[in-house]
Image (tube, grey):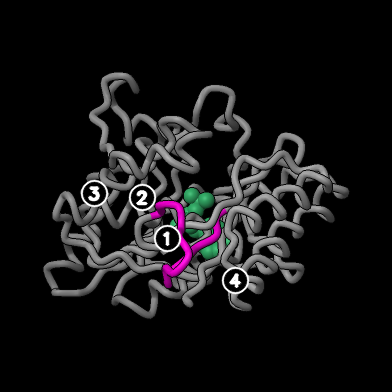
Amino acid sequence: MKTVNTIIALRHTIAAWRSSGERIAFVPTMGNLHDGHLALIDEAKKQADHTVASIFVNPLQFGEGEDFETYPRTLDEDSSQLASHGVDLLFAPPVEVMYPLAQQQQTRVEVPEVSDILEGVFRPGFFVGVATVVCKLFNMVQPDIAIFGEKDFQQLHIIRRMVEDLQMPVEIAASPTVRESDGLAMSSRNSYLDSEQRKTAPLIYRCLQQAVDVINGGGDDYAQLESAAIATLEKAGFVVDYFTLRNAETLNPANAGEKNLVILTAARLGQTRLIDNLSLKL
Ligand code: AMP
C-alpha cells in the first residue's frame, strides 16, 4: 500500500489508474479503524479495481467543546490494517493540505434542512463540516464509487443529497452497521467508555430492536414507543438527545401507514455520545 500526504501525489497515482480505464472505490474515514471501517474497505474491494482510503480528523465538523483534540489518532495501526485488507492507496493529509486558508475563509457546502434536524440540532455546523470535507475529498480522489456506513444514517442521507444536488459523478454505496457481539455499534468513541458504561451501552441496541419488534408486530403508537424507549434509557443512566421513528427516505417524522422506516437515536453516557439506528420495511 502506498501512503500519500499531498494532493499532487494523490492525483499522480490516481491519474495512472484512471488513464488505464480502471475503476476506483473510495472510503473516507477519520481513522482509529475498527471492523466497521474494514467492512467498508472489503466492500470497496469488491466494487472496483483500486481502493483508496483516507484518514483525516476533520476540524470543520467538530463543534466548540467537542473532542477534536482528544479524538484517537492511531495512524500506524490503521495503516497496517488497511494494507492487510488490500487498500492500494492511503491519503492521510495534514490539516493545512485540506484547509490552506483559515477555517472561517473556507468555502463550505451546505445541504439545507436535513442538516438541521436530529444530529444537526445537537451538533450545529456538523453536517456543513462533513459535506464540505467529503466534497473536497471527492474532488481530489474523483472516485467512481464511495462507500459509507449505515451507522451514520443521517450522514449517508446528506451525502446522497449533496451528490444528487451537485451532480457529482460518483455512486454512493451503503454498508450495514458492524456491531460488537453484545450489539453495541462499533465506534471509535466507544473507547471513551469506562467499564461500567461499556456494560450499559448495548441497551441502546436492545431498545432499537424492541421498538422494531413492536412495530413489526403491528404497533403503531409511535409517540408511545419513543417515550417508552427514552424512559428505559434514562433509567439506565443515559441522557437521551433523541429516540425517534422517521421515514427512511425523507427523515421526516414517521406517520402510521408509512412502509419504509428508520429508528434513530443519540444518547450520552457520561461524556460519551453514542448514536445508532435500525431500519425496517413494513
Ligand atoms: P468515521 O471514521 O467515524 O468518520 O467513519 C468513517 C466511515 O465508517 C463512515 O462512513 C461511517 O459511517 C463508517 N462506520 C463507522 N462505524 C461503523 C460501523 N460500526 N459499521 C459500519 N460502518 C461504520
Looking at numbered disc 4 in the image, what kind of residue is underneath it?
Answer: Ile
> Residue 222 colored magenta?
no
Of residues 57 and 213, the one drawn nearer to the viewer in this rendering: 213
Q: Point out the stretch of residues depicted in magenta.
A: 251-264
Residue 131, position as x, y percentages in the image: 32, 43
Looking at numbered disc 2 in the image, what kind of residue is underneath it?
Answer: Val
Distance (Cα) linking label 3 and label 2: 12 Å
Label 2: which residue? 4
**Up-down: is 154 above or below 148?**
above
Distance (Cα) linking label 1 and label 3: 33 Å
Label 4: which residue? 215
Looking at numbered disc 1 in the image, what kind of residue is underneath it?
Answer: Asn
Mark drawn on residue 176: none
Residue 192, position as x, y percentages in the image: 73, 42
Rendered residue at 18%/64% (across/down): 16
Label 3: which residue? 140
The nearer-to-camera label among 2 and 4 is 4
Q: Are marks 4 and 1 in contact (CB under 8 Å)?
A: no
Q: First in sequence, mark 2 or 4: give its number.
A: 2
SS state under label 3: helix
Query: How many residues crowd mark 3 within 10 Å: few (<14), some (14–19), many (20+)?
Result: some
Residue 139, position as x, y percentages in the image: 21, 49
Q: First in sequence, mark 4 or 1: give its number.
A: 4
Query: How many residues crowd mark 4 within 10 Å: few (<14), some (14–19), many (20+)?
Result: some
Distance (Cα) linking label 2 and label 4: 48 Å
